[in-house]
Amino acid sequence: MWMDGWIYIPLATCCSCPYFISLNLSSYFYLRSVCQCQIIIYPRLPLPLMTHEHSRRPSLLANDALDDDELEQIRRYEDFRTIDWIQDSILERNRRIRSTRRFNASHRGPHGEVTVSWLWTQFRKAVDGGQTWFVVSLVGVCIGLNAAIISIITEWLSDIKMGYCYDGWWLNQQFCCWEIDWEGTDGCKSWHPWSTVGVARWFIYVLFAAMFSFVAAHLVRSLAKYAAGSGISEIKCILAGFVMQGFLGFATFAIKSITLPLVIASGLSVGKEGPSVHVACCIGSLVAGMFGKFNRSQGKMREIVTAASAAGVAVAFGAPIGGVLFSIEEMSHTFSIKTMWRSFFCALMATVTLSAMNPFRTGKLVLFQVTYDRDWHFFEIIFFIILGIFGGLYGAFVVKFNLQVAAFRRKFLAKHAVAEAVVLATLTAMIGYSNQFLRIDMTESMSILFRECDNGGDVNNVCQSSLQWRISNSLLLATVIRIGLVVVSYGCKVPAGIFVPSMAIGATFGRMIGIMVKAMYTAYPSSGIFAFCAPDAPCITPGTYAFLGAAAALSGVMQITVTVVVIMFELTGALTYILPTMIVLLVTKAVGDFLGTNGIADEMIRFNGYPFLEKEDHAFNVSVSAVMRKDLSTLKESGMRVKDIEATLAATDFKGFPLVSEDGTRVLGGYIGRTELMYVLERSRKTQDIRPDTLCLFKADDGDADLENFDLGGALAVGIDNEEDFAETILENTASGGRQIKFWPWVNQSPLTVSPQLPLEIVMQLFKRMGPRVILVEDHGILAGLITVKDVLRWIAVEKPEREPSWDERGGLDGMLEEVWTNSPPPPHPSLRLPLPVCFFIACCFNSFVSYLPSYFSVAPMGLTAQERENYSRQLAEYTRQQFAAARRTLDNHKAAAAKLPALHAARDGSLSTRRGQHPQQLPAQQKPVPT
């Protein structure tokens, strides 16, 4: 639809791109791609209708005053586009060249004396060199301040649901009862509950939860839709080059900072650590955007955002080194040493600022920070492995069913985001109020579960031996309920993370295991597995099991290992628990890999259809020729006129065009972007009267100026600073007296090219490591096609190349058992079968071993007298003899029945052969299967 000089295109779906329904990956304004799809969805395409009439058209540029940087001003990365990192690197190189020339233009005096201009140049050099570290420091300080404010407000809002402080309404329960220990806050006279009636307190608790969730969801829906969710998946794509305008903007930062405390206080089973990373990246983008050095370069901006993500994790967990490792392991594809140092410095500044603010007034950076002074025992590895298995199973369960909930939400609840958040918060409050571990904040719950029972750790009776089974039941119920709440709550349209909910689930399960192990030790202190325990010191510390369970659950849902180990070490400061943490996380990782589980961030990227290549390498056994696009729209190096170029721009929406020779042989001569074409045409019209039949030249002639006068990579020429220079350099007269436009200074004469026989895996490595938007495919200099990231992802989604199927694709446990049954080898030849006595001996030994297991773990043989031990051994021998006799009778009966029914055995063999692919009609008549 044509209106006010623009083409308005309604939302539509490209039939050739079914996998990327929600994105417009093929048409964008800045990146020089030649995607051959039509427009998928994009409501407004800034391309005026082009005619061949000789008239002055309105300018495509926003400003009339054109300067040296105008090309990069109109080259704004548009929403849902991918950055060409090679092109961005070329532009950054050109900026450095111009900056170096300006700095070298000023020299000392004739006799070496110091001049004012030379001093000013040296000062500008020092400022330019230290600007990056200043920006990184400023970003870290702002992140620390924001994290401290969010923590303080969150604590107050969480406590206001239960009551208020009489001495000051702005104080939370901890500050209101500062002089009273943690376990004695119920006796604080300054803290007043809203009501002494249980039903009224429950109603007020639910009402506050619903109100907080409503305000948060309404603000997100009305002012900043990008503030919903965790944001880690999108930030990973942004760091890989995917552009989402507004995702790191001020509105997103402000709304997410305001609504995050409301969401946490509402009691929803979501966390603030993931959104804290998003908020930190917003701060990094906003602060760096105030400096031209970073605003012009997407590569430098990516370094700042990466450092900000590390600082976000650092303030969320109080772990600066863990934050740096998180940015390396989870966030960034490519990570240089320079970026690592900046990330470390930014995380350090954020952590120091948070420590100076001291939001909890306890010296702790996070509420669940603990310290362990006890050692662990080797027999506990058995129970640590159980925690690791739970973490892997939990991650697989949550990832699978949360994606199903997300699909249901997208299909049925897209227009009811506020109602969904309110209903979830209300149900969570109604269900969780009756459980002491669900009623309080998750960080506070973890701080209680992580503690040792000594030194004030008996909070909410978690250390009372007389109530251990009631506490265990409460912990089990909290684990099951919170798993279900996390599955349905993560992904709703409010700021929602999954770090702390997963850790809270692992903490409740781990504390339950720890209480059970401690109960076993209390009941049987002289049993074999507890022989290593010192009699005068506590043997089992349930808090460490909660700590390890939290690490297992976090690793299971995010599929990260090294980062979690370091974060947990920084939380506890205990070197002795690094080995148990590594054991638990390795088991969790092994279970997740066996079940084919990916991290929930990667699964959400795949679910949303973002153009993101995974870090893992795959073997597809195909070449580039099977994936590339072959039907291309190209331009000729010479012979084309302005009307031809305008017709091509009007007829297509491709963002770049390969240049081929004019003789029809399709010899590749270079590549030019759509933006450059529009820029040169517009500049030419502003300086001279260009006619539709004006010639266009994309190849430099022998008489042209030296190429050193121009920057490489199709960037704007350095020496062209005004309209007259542009007209003299770009426009020239032909031999016939006409005019021609020289496009060749903006042509990329050395685009990235590959051979059609190159394996697809190598091309994927080029995309991941070098970051081009498009790769041209040439065969001995002849243009054969092109390939983009979108082409690779669409081929993977449509063709489904051969690979090892995941756990879900194999059908889960039932599918695995069926696969084992159907793929089991045929019965061996009778001469190779084990004799019956051998089978009898193996069966009896196994039966005796199973029967002996309860006696090993029981206290019966250990604490008896010699006579009682002899009686016990006699009874065990009699029991074993009876088992031998029963097994022998079973084998004799089976042997007699087999001798009487030989036909049945033949029929059985025939049915097995049929199941392995042999048709019954191919068998002899006496071996056909007997119907049952």
Image (spheres, rainbow, N blue to C red):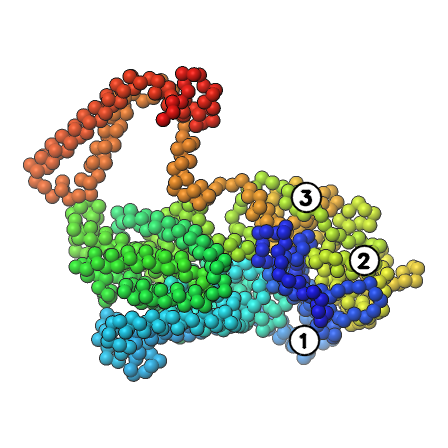
- The crowd level at tag 3 (other Cα within 10 Å; few <14, some 14-19, many 20+) is some
| Label 1: element kind | helix
Question: Measured along the vertical axis of the image, is residue 380 above or below residue 642?
Answer: above
What secondary structure is found at the residue carrying circle 2?
A: helix
The numbered mark at residue 214 is none
Q: Quadrant of the N terminus?
A: bottom right
Horizontally, residue 383 falls left or right of residue 103, namely left
> Quadrant of residue 851 in the image?
top left
Q: Amino acid at mark 3?
A: Ser
Secondary structure, mark 3, is loop
Identity, as a three-letter code, of the amino acid under mark 2: Asp
Which residue is at a point 39% across and 46% down the rendered structure image? 591
Q: Which residue is mark 1?
A: 118
* Residue 635 in sight in this render: yes
| Residue at the image position 46 percent from the left and 54 percent from the top | 403
Please identify, in this view, whether the residue under mark 2 or under mark 1 is nearer the observer: 2
Q: Alpha-carbon neighbours of circle 2 within 10 Å: few (<14), some, or many (≥20)?
A: some
**Which residue position holds label 2?**
644
Where 715 sits versus 151, above or below? above
Lateral position of residue 817 relative to residue 891, left or right: right
Picture residue at 24% right of the left edge, 57% below the top = 472
| Residue at which label 3 appears | 755
The quadrant holding residue 712 is bottom right
